[in-house]
């Protein structure tokens, strides 16, 4: 369906008519307009079902003052009654409502008694079944004290009898403080999962991070009676290949633009901020962090949902002011204008976001020390949020756990940039963040392995490309191998999602795996090596990205064993040589005898092998292995 802003083309004229009728023209240019929200009394002047839940400017919704409350307060759990909404001469139409008492499970694991008020907005008879998820509204009073605690409102925009938007409104002491909003953009009738009339379940895995959809939070500005962006505003999911699963996911953190990370490093996830009263610092909100993740190997689909491979973590201080961010819905209970970046323009915002710091994360393999997946894919460690940063080594505000530590490559820069730039390194045959000053990956805890070690990467000359790799074994503070290169063999890759997918799957992965195969075969000709069973299995199972990483780890193990054995042999020969045993060697003795001459030739060849290997020049490395084999053969015919 074609869209203009957040609205279907067929609804634009209707929207403009609504704006005119309700006196909301100012809402089209500013969420803070006093005439846009509760101050204007939208609820009191709306249809009967909107009048029933009219909220005061300070967000109060008093249930104890309702004419049906005395009867409701006498209910036992399991009892209910249906009433007809009172009508007025100005509003003669009236509808049916249901009031019941139930044991209500909460997300925190507790169960409370609750009075639940159900309003059948579209008068479709749903109350016979206790309500539906079409155009019904549910107000829950936990503890039955006469004050609202939650409101769940389902909105059918297009009249097809399934929900298109959804509000989960949170009240504190009977006053509305914030709301989670949902938008069903792929018309699968799924948005939020609920436990006891609030966002519930183990996680959002049970809701709708699949396909095209968007969720976001707003806080009620009680000074103006309007919505303001806060927290995750939005989380947006993009199905780029129309298979019903998402390939791109975005999260923007909306917090006061001048917030102090020293006071609240994770403001966007701090529920004490959302639950508190409106604070004047919230009047100027900023988009201070963006998570931007992608499926690069085209495996995200029904068989492997949420298969994200890499992501950017962007930190900046951009005012939360974006074209088209004022989303009006005449069927929404007031305030009717919410604030959120438009779905269709959000990725463009991310592409050019001016970041003061950038983190880059690449999911290389799974991590057996955690369980952050879901359902049949629980052990795969794929998060519905994408691939994002963690609070280790380089702190970045408003992002962090729980996420994966092992086998995720991290790269970081504090160079300001308003572009997402990548390059391919022919040294390690990987895609990197252009401009990254440093990076690391902790390796292990997959395929039956313990902690194996770590690789650290550095840009030592400041040209934007890594030129130094340090390889550490687990538990050792001195690198077992260091590679410093003059030629980074770097090739810039335009940040075009479809092109990047094609380059990675059709060239980078197969070429890297073929190069590994050739080098490992050449090393095996020189020295036997048994790949650990779990690792050998991992090299044959899972995605190509997973198999390649397992292969890389096995190749590095094999190389270190070969290097250690041959170096040890040569150095032992040098150490064993004594002055009184030395004599001039005649004829072909120099080339065919195990002696210091032979040992030094071997050490020199191993050094040249090390340089070629560290530079990613596997063709030269294979040639050096052949030379070493010739040296060995000359003394062991």
Image (spheres, rainbow, N blue to C red):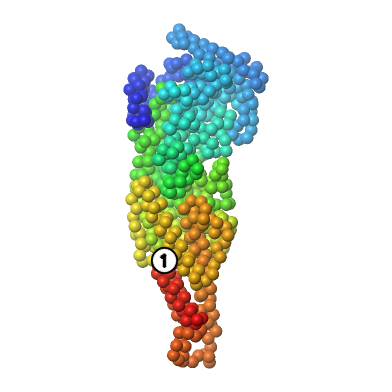
Asked where in the image residue 68 lies, by quadrant, the reply is top right
Question: Can you say whether 333 is above or below 471 in the image?
Answer: above
The residue sitting at the right extreme is 76
Point 45% across, 27% down: residue: 164
Point 53% across, 16% down: residue: 125
The residue sitting at the front extreme is 637
Q: Residues within 10 Å of mark 1 (few under 14, many from 20)?
A: some
Question: Can you say whether 539 is above or below 5 in the image?
Answer: below
Q: Which residue is mark 1?
A: 618
Point 43% across, 46% down: residue: 298
Q: Is residue 573 left or right of residue 40?
A: right
- x and y percentages locating residue 565 in the rendered image: 53, 73
The N terminus: image quadrant: top left
Name the foreground residue: 191 vs 110.
191
The residue sitting at the top extreme is 89
- x and y percentages locating residue 302 in the rendered image: 49, 40
From where the camera sits, is residue 399 visible?
Answer: no
- x and y percentages locating residue 221 in the rendered image: 44, 29
From where the camera sits, is residue 116 visible?
Answer: yes
The secondary element bearing badge 1 is classed as: helix
- x and y percentages locating residue 290 in the rendered image: 42, 43
Name the foreground residue: 324 vs 172.
324
Mark count: 1
Point 66% across, 20% down: residue: 76
């Amino acid at each position: 369906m074609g869209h203009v802003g957040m609205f279907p083309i067929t609804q634009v004229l209707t929207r403009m008519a609504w704006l005119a009728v309700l006196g909301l023209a100012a809402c089209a240019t500013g969420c803070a307009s006093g005439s846009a929200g509760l101050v204007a009394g939208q609820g009191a002047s709306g249809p009967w079902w909107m009048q029933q839940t009219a909220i005061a400017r300070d967000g109060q919704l008093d249930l104890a003052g309702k004419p049906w409350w005395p009867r409701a307060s006498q209910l036992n759990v399991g009892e209910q009654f249906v009433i007809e909404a009172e009508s007025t001469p100005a509003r003669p139409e009236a509808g049916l409502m249901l009031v019941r008492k139930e044991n209500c499970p909460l997300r925190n694991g507790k169960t409370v008694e609750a009075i639940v008020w159900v309003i059948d907005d579209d008068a479709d008879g749903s109350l016979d079944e206790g309500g539906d998820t079409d155009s019904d509204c549910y107000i829950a009073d936990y503890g039955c004290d006469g004050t609202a605690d939650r409101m769940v409102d389902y909105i059918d925009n297009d009249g097809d009898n399934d929900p298109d938007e959804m509000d989960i409104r949170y009240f504190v002491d009977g006053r509305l403080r914030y709301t989670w909003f949902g938008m069903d953009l792929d018309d699968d009738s799924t948005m939020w999962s609920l436990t006891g009339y609030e966002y519930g379940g183990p996680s959002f895995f049970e809701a709708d991070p699949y396909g095209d959809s968007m969720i976001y939070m707003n806080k009620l500005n009680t000074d103006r009676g309007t919505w303001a962006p806060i927290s995750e505003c939005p989380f947006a999911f993009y199905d780029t290949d129309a298979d019903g699963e998402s390939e791109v996911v975005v999260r923007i953190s909306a917090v006061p633009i001048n917030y102090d990370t020293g006071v609240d490093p994770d403001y966007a996830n701090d529920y004490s901020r959302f639950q508190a009263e409106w604070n004047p610092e919230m009047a100027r909100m900023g988009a201070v962090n963006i998570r931007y993740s992608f499926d690069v190997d085209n495996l995200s689909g029904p068989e492997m949902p949420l298969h994200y491979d890499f992501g950017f973590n962007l930190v900046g201080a951009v005012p939360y002011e974006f074209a088209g961010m004022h989303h009006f819905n005449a069927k929404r209970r007031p305030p009717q204008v919410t604030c959120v970046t438009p779905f269709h323009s959000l990725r463009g915002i991310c592409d050019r976001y001016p970041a003061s710091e950038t983190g880059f994360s690449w999911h290389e393999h799974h991590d057996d020390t955690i369980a952050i997946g879901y359902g049949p894919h629980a052990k795969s460690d794929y998060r519905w949020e994408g691939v994002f940063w963690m609070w280790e080594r380089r702190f970045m505000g408003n992002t962090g756990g729980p996420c994966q530590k092992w086998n995720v490559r991290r790269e970081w820069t504090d160079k300001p940039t308003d572009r997402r730039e990548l390059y391919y390194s022919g040294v390690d045959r990987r895609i990197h963040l252009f401009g990254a000053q440093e990076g690391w990956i902790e390796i292990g805890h997959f395929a039956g392995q313990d902690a194996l070690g770590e690789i650290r990467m550095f840009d030592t000359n400041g040209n934007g490309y890594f030129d130094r790799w340090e390889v550490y074994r687990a538990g050792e503070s001195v690198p077992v191998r260091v590679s410093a290169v003059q030629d980074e063999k770097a090739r810039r890759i335009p940040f075009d999602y479809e092109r990047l997918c094609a380059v990675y799957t059709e060239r980078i992965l197969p070429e890297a795996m073929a190069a590994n195969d050739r080098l490992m075969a050449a090393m095996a000709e020189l020295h036997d090596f048994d790949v650990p069973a779990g690792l050998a299995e991992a090299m044959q199972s899972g995605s190509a990205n997973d198999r390649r990483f397992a292969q890389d780890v096995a190749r590095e193990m094999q190389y270190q064993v070969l290097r250690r054995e041959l170096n040890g042999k040569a150095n032992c020969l040098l150490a064993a040589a004594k002055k009184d045993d030395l004599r001039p060697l005649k004829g072909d003795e120099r080339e065919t005898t195990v002696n210091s001459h032979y040992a030094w030739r071997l050490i020199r060849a191993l050094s040249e092998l090390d340089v070629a290997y560290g530079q990613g020049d596997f063709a030269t490395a294979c040639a050096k292995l052949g030379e070493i084999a010739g040296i060995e053969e000359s003394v062991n015919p």
